[in-house]
Amino acid sequence: MDIEFERSLRSTLQAVTADAAPDQILYALQSLGWSELVSETPTAFALLYDELGKAAHSTSLIDQLVFSELPPALARCGVIAYPPPSRGHRPPCQLTDAEILVDGWALRTPNVDDRVLVAAASTHDGPPVPVELPPLKTLRGLEISPLKTFDTEDGWVRITGKTSRADTVLHPGTATWPDVLNTARRAAATELAGLARGALALAVAHVNTRTQFGRTIGSFQAVRHRLADAHVLVAATDALLEEAWRDPSPENTNLAFAYAGRAHRDVLAHCIQVCGAMGLSWEHKLHRHLRRGYALEAFFGPAEEVTERLGAELLLAQTT
Amino acid sequence: MIGKSQFQAPSEADISLASFRDHLRRWLQQEFAEPLTDDGHSVEESTRHGARLLAQLYEAGWNRFGWPTEVGGLGGDVRHRAVLYDELCRANIEPPEQNIITEVVGPALVAFAPDIAAEYLPRVLRGRAILCQGFSEPESGSDLASLRCRATRDSAGDFVLNGQKIWTSFGHLADHIIVLCRTGAPDSRSRGLTMLFVDMTSPGVEARPIRFANGRNELAEVFFRDVNVPQDRLVGEIDAGWAVAGYLLQFERGMYAWMRHAMLSNRLRQLAAYLAVSSPDNNTTRYQQRLGEAVLAVAALRARSSRTIDALAQQRTVGPAASTDKLLLAAAEHAVYDLARDVLSPAFGLDATQPDILRWRNEWFYSRAASIYGGAAEIQRSIIADRVLNLPRE
């Protein structure tokens, strides 16, 4: 993507994300030819997640990157229900001969017409695979309950229950669930970088205008150096993300995600400190950058767990 | 042994990076069946190891890629040099320590003094000469533009150099030094500085090693008393030495950082191997988290400095963004060596009778300087605050 095209795409994305309600952004993008754009230029997704992060929009658009990489037969789904977050293993939905036992978390409330994509494993064998449920209105026995995540108090939901396997579409051999998670994690890492970048911009604006002791506080070395450190974290995340989008291997994705999650945490700490009490008020946008980032980091990571696994993999590589 | 290898250096026509890496990797496998490290106990021995390795690499051609033909090179760009360090470290071969200066001073000579570069760089690449750089002075550390080492002109137009430099890596071992000195008025700051290339054997030059906190002679102080420097030893223009220094520092941010990243990756693997295989107690899981953190710090340095090297290869100016690379380098150095100190405890602190422990200890001490040399971390943060974030000046 050349610089001129990137600039014009960014300004389009900024206009769309500024005007549309979060649940309308996808429709707005599609009316502008988003599907054609990303089929030719998949890295347009990277700009989208960066801009969503910068604006601290809570959306379910991370799902869209996954859909774009799945076989077309699975891409008619509207929502992904990810295995419930927990330390360590995340149990997929269990398939039996006649039924599927569903337990998953989605980034938005599905509509009655939505087909939900879940991770499922038969009780007997193999890694979980993506499975498409028929439209929700045709299913009996599923319950959708709102979750109180750190991100927003509405939007994220848990889908649970036992329902018939009839009409579910299983595509073994096309993509495994770890592939899905890898893709979603790359999208989440990019949004985390955008959230940190947006928070840093808010903090820079604040220290440029706030005056104490007769000076703008951005002229105090203690403040300047905190924000310089924040910049370094954002810039390093960008470099790792660039590699992950160029070569989306699990290794590159995990490096970018773990770094992005830790960088987001540290950048927000710097920004909150220099914005003082104002940055902790409800009306200041900073807390939205913090909330969304913590939720994404916990849900698609957590970053500490991914970091520990990077260490474990390095150890393992020495013995094999 | 040399010259009989079936894996010769690729021809000039075939210097695509992938092919270069592939051929180099096979050549290293064939030539070096065993890891090749020096014991790390003395800088003198380390540079001798480096000289032997350079001679071998030069004869086969590998370290000539990435340098222009005018200085004995075989074409290509800085990325070829980056690949060489990657592959040496991957093969457990300690890169030549003197190259940390060659990588920084060499490009400045090529760009600003092509005749000097053509005369001296081939010797340096062969391992027959060592370069050093004289920037810091006792009273001019972070405030480099205040330096006082002075060059005047004699009646023949040659320079006469007087003053002192300090913290000069390999100063007591080097054959030539690149000296940033004042030619303008005492208060001319960065506008009145000039870069000279000085023969260390000239009358009036004296280099005294400085014993570093780890016991090695990493550094030196260099004195100049009425040293005659021929006028053709000028690097760049008179009073334009600051631009040469700025150009040179881009390579410190790019190539030096890349070299260190390659070496840090290797050290991290060695540390993991120690934990996984030979650690006496079963403490593997205790360090997984910190190993992961060190992996992240080195990966961030790699990703960032590979971008910087791409910029250098395309001859784009790197600018203030390079301060980010410098801070990431210090973070990676500290992450790897602080982890090593803890993993190797208590021997690290109490029993260095094993040479390996002594080496880790020496390197740990030197890693403390990573946030000081080449521009202290505080200076880098101020550059980012001023020139990247555009914050109000202090």
Image: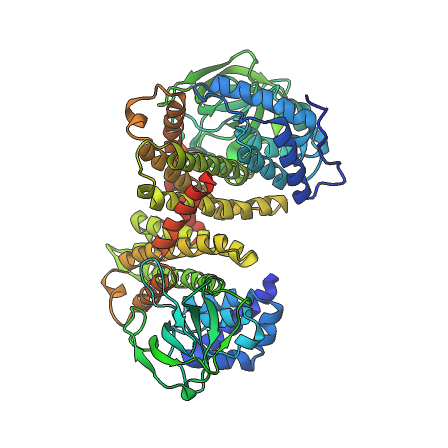
Q: How is the image coloured?
A: rainbow
In front of the other: A210 or A314: A314
Residue B152 lies left or right of residue A255; in this view the side is right
Q: Is residue B328 something one can see in this rendering?
A: no
Which of the 4 quarters of the picture holds residue B187?
A: top left
Q: In this orientation, does residue B152 appear?
A: yes
Image: B273 above or below B308: above
Of residues A122 and B320, the one drawn nearer to the viewer in this rendering:
A122
- Where, quadrant-wise, is the N terminus of chain B in this rendering? top right
- Could you tell me which residue is drawn at 41 percent across and 88 percent down? A137
Quadrant assignment, res B24: top right
Image position, residue B48 (x, y; %):
54, 18
- Which of the 4 quarters of the picture holds residue A254? bottom left
Is B36 displayed left or right of A309 in the figure?
Answer: right
Q: Residue at x 38, y 31 (%)?
A: B278
Q: Is residue A138 above or below residue A125?
A: below
Q: How many marks?
A: 0
Looking at the image, the residue that sits furthest to the top is: B203
- Residue nearer the viewer, B314 or B265: B265
Q: Position of residue B352 (x, y in %)?
A: 34, 21
Asked whether, in this view, residue B246 is left or right of residue B292, the answer is: right
Is A233 or B162 nearer to us in this picture?
A: A233
- x, y (%) of residue A175? 53, 66
**Vertical order, B165 against A318 (above or below):** above
**Image coordinates for residue A126, horizontal then vertical, percent:** 46, 62
Q: Is residue B103 above or below residue A229?
A: above
The residue positioned 53% from the left and 23% from the top of the image is B151
